[in-house]
Image: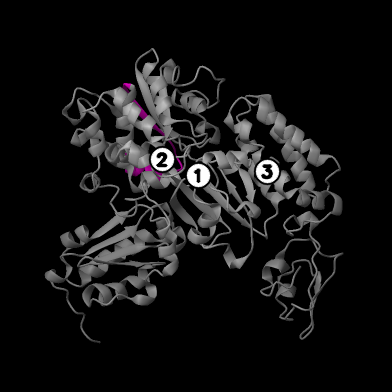
Amino acid sequence: MPAKKTAKKADIKDLVIRVCVGTGGLAAGSQEVMDEFGSQLKSHGIKAEIVKKCVNKTGCRGFCAKDVLADVILNDKSETYQLLTPEMVSRIVEEHIVNGSPVKEWLVGPEYHAFHDKQTKILLKQCGHIDPEDIDAYIKIGGYEGARKIFSLEPSEVIEEIRASGLRGRGGAGFLTGLKWELCSKAEGSPKYIICNADEGDPGAFMDRSVIEGNPHSVIEGMVIGGYAIGANYGYVYIRAEYPLAIQRLKIAISDARKKGFLGENIFKTKFDFDIKIKEGAGAFICGEETALIASIEGKRGMPRAKPPFPAHKGLWGKPTVINNVETLSTLPTIITQGAKWFSSIGTEKSKGTKVFAITGKIKNTGLIEVPMGMSLREIVYDIGGGCEKNCALKAVQTGGPSGGCIPASHIDMPVDYESLMAIGSMMGSGGMVVMDDTTCMVDMAKFFLSFTQNESCGKCTPCRIGTKRMLEILTRITNGKGREGDIELLLELGNSIKLTSLCGLGMSAPNPVLSTIRFFRDEYEAHIRDGICPAAVCKALRIYTVSVELCKMCGKCFKACPSAAIAWEKKQPAKIDKGKCIKCGACYEACPFNAIL
C-alpha cells in the first residue's frame, strides 16, 4: 500500500470545514462526521490545535433533506458535500484536502442551488456559516453593532424605527411590533419585562429552534434592543425543554455575552442594566399563547386569561410586558443596522420583510427557508421545494400550524402574506408549511390537526374544551365509515361557534383545518358519508382493496405481505383479494412496487 501523503502546513493554512450540527444534522450523524474529519486530519500529520481551528460546527443549513451537509473551504474555494457519512470522510480528506481534487460525485447538485437561489436571507444568513457557540464569530460578522447603535438614540427613536420598518410579529397574528412596544413603553408600572416566546410546538415546525441553535446571539441582541426601547431591565426566554441543544447553546451565548459586558449591569459601558433568564417550559402547546406563557413563568398552571388587559399593560407579575417570538427578535439587529427603509423595501405593502418557513410533508426538498413576503406558493413549492415526492400531483398546502387552513392546489399562485392567507381561511402562524399530494385524505388530515389541538386544549373555556371534542367525534365517525347526513353542516356550525366564543387564540383557530377542508374539499367529505369511499384510500374502514390485472406483475409480494391469508396467488398468475378475509390493514398496498393494489 502506498504511504499516505502528508499535508504541509502551507497546504492547510486556509482550510475551513463547516459541518451542520443542528438538531437535524445531529440526527443524520453530523457529530460523527465532524469527529471523523478531526481524526483523519490528525492522521495526515496536521496538529491538533490546527484541526480544532479548522473544523467548525454550525447550525442548520436549511436543506435538511441533504443532511449531513459540510463545506470544505480550501484556499478560498468552497465546495459543499451532501448526505455525508463518517465512512466518506477519509476519501474527502485524502483526495480533496491533501491532493486538491474534490470528490465530485458527492458534491451538492443543481437542486441544492435552486433551493437557495430564490431565498432572501436575513435571519438565516449566518445560520450554517458561524459557530453558534463562539461569540467572537458573531461579533466578526457585525454582531451586537445594532445593540451598540441604539445607545446613541432615545428609546422613542428606536421604537419609531421599528414602526417605520413595518415589522409585524412573526409568531401568529402579525401585530405591528413597533405599536406593541409603544403601548408598553407608555404603560404605567415598573419594572417592565420583555419575553422571548420560544415555545414552538406546531407539528412540523422548527424555525425558532433552528435560529437559536444556529445564531443564539441574534436573539440576545434583539432582546437588548427591545428592552432598551420599552424601558425593561429584565428579559426571559421561554423555551420548551424538548429543545436541549437550543437551550445549551443559548446558555453558552448568555454566559459569553455577560463576560463581554453585553448583559448585566451597565451594558456596553452605558448606564443601562439588562439581563436575561431562561425559563424551560414543560411542552404544553397552550403556553405559546402569551397569557398562558406568563402564567407558566409565574409558576402557575399555563392557562390563558381574558383580554383586556393586554400584557403590554398588565403582563408578567402584573407589570407591563412585551412578548415577541424568536424570529421577530432576531430580525431587530439587522433593521437597526440596515435601517427601516431598507427592511420595508422587502415584501408587500402590508407584509414587510421576509418570513421563515419549515416546509415539510410530501415534498422533495424538506427544510428551512426564508423568503420575501408575497412570494407565490407556486415558487415556494416548486422552485424551492422541488415539487411533490414521487412526482405526485399537489393537492393542498397547510399553513399556520395545526390551527391553520388547507390551501388547495387551485390557489397555487396566491401570494404568501398575512392578508392573503387570512382571506383564504388560513393564517401565517409561526411558519409551518405542510405539503400534501393526491395520496392525502383531507378528512383524515383535518382529523389529525384537530386531534392535536383538542388534546392540547387547556380546558378552561367550554367552547374549546367541549366543542373541539364534539367536532373530533364527528370526524372520527366519518373516517370510520359511519358518517351521517347533516354531519358536514354540524361541523360548520360547531366550528364557527367555537371560533366566535373561545377564550384564546387556540380555540379561535382550532376549527380552521376542518372549515377550510370542507370549503375546498367538500366532495371528499360527501364521498366518505354518502358513498362509503375514501378517495385517497387512506381511511382503513373505507378501503376496498382490489388488484389491477393490467398493472399486476405477478410477483407475489402482496401475497407474502398479507397477514390474514386474504390474497390468492400462483406463479405467473395475477393476485386476487378475498374481500371477506381482508382486514384492510394496507400491507399489500405498501408491499406492491407496481401500484397494482387499488
**Residue at image mark 3:** 516
At 83% from the left and 47% from the top, the residue drawn is: 482
Mark 2 Cα-neighbour bin, 10 Å: few <14, some 14–19, many ≥20: many
Task: Classify residue 155 as left or right of residue 533.
Answer: left
In the picture of the structure, the residue carrying the numbered disc 2 is 327
Q: Identify which residue is drawn at 21% across, 25% down.
A: 265
Q: Are marks 2 and 3 in contact (CB under 8 Å)?
A: no
- If the image is split into quadrants, where does the N terminus sit? bottom left
Judge whether residue 79 is colored magenta. Answer: no
Amino acid at dot 2: Glu
Circles 1 and 2, Cβ within 8 Å, touching? The answer is yes
Q: Amino acid at mark 1?
A: Gly
Answer whether residue 234 is magenta in the image.
yes
Q: Quadrant of residue 3?
A: bottom left
The kind of residue tagged 3 is Ser
Task: Decide: is 411 above or below 144.
Answer: below
The alpha-carbon separation of the residues under discs 2 and 3 comes to: 27 Å
- Dot 2 falls on a residue whose secondary structure is helix
Q: Residues within 10 Å of mark 1 (few under 14, many from 20)?
A: many
Q: Which residue is mark 1?
A: 431
Marks 2 and 3, the one that precedes in the sequence: 2
Magenta-drawn segment:
231-250
